């Protein structure tokens, strides 16, 4: 029996075929660590842990990446409100996240990068998008230019 997954682009179930033979790379957006986990975090953890385990069971060499967003406005505001360093706040909630996921018997991913460890790469990517006309700056923020991507909305079925 082959593994079948739903392809949003074709709108049907299709046989799973990895890009590289016997190897699967899986990226899952992680939590923004400004507060304790909620049931949605638990659900995502269980779902992707199940997929991770099943792919390994099927014999794939799986690289599973789940990030931590460890800097943003919510984090800064919460830290200021509590009169603590934002790094201390994120450390507290990363530890709480691990405790919660442990109680759900969720395995650790292959890697768990923190956003703050990759600021230079993010800035370089943003600069590249702006230079190529794929993003633009407005009032100190940078926005993706959806009109620069002909197939934007294809997965959602929305026409901009």
Image (cartoon, helix red, strand yellow):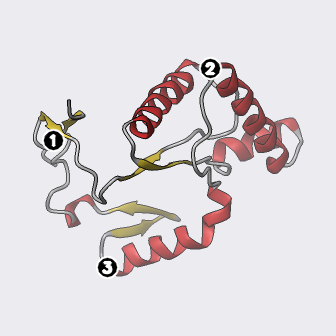
Residue density around tag 3, few if under 14, some if 14–19, many if 20 or more, within 10 Å: few
Q: How many marks?
A: 3
Q: Nearer the viewer, residue 142 or 92?
A: 92
Q: Residue at x 20, y 63 (%)?
A: 149
- Location of residue 61 with respect to 39 vertically, above or below: below
Q: In x, y percent, where is residue 41?
A: 55, 27
Q: Earlier in the sequence, mark 2 or mark 3?
A: 2
Secondary structure at badge 2 equals loop
Residue at the extreme bottom of the image, as rendered:
131
Secondary structure at badge 1 equals loop
Query: Spatial distance from mark 2 to mark 3, Cα to Cα?
Result: 44 Å
Q: In x, y percent, where is residue 80?
A: 82, 43
Q: Residue at x 65, y 47 (%)?
A: 73
Per the image, the residue denoted by label 1 is 158
Left or right: 145 in relation to 123: left
Per the image, the residue denoted by label 3 is 132
Q: Earlier in the sequence, mark 1 or mark 2?
A: 2
Q: Residue at x 60, y 73 (%)?
A: 120
Residue density around tag 1, few if under 14, some if 14–19, many if 20 or more, within 10 Å: few
């Amino acid at each position: 029996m082959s593994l079948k997954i739903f392809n949003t682009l074709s709108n049907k179930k299709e046989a799973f075929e990895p890009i590289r033979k016997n190897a699967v790379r899986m990226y899952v957006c992680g939590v923004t660590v400004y507060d304790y986990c909620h049931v949605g975090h638990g659900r995502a953890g269980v779902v992707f842990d199940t997929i991770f385990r099943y792919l390994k069971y099927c014999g794939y060499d799986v690289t599973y990446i789940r990030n931590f967003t460890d800097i943003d406005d919510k984090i800064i505001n919460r830290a200021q409100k509590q009169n603590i360093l934002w790094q201390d706040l994120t450390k507290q909630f990363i530890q709480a996240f691990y405790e919660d996921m442990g109680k759900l018997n969720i395995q650790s991913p292959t890697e768990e990068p923190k956003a703050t460890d990759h600021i230079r790469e993010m800035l370089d990517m943003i600069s590249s998008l702006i230079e190529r006309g794929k993003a633009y700056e407005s009032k100190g923020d940078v926005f993706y230019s959806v009109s620069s991507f002909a197939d934007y909305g294809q997965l959602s079925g929305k026409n901009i």
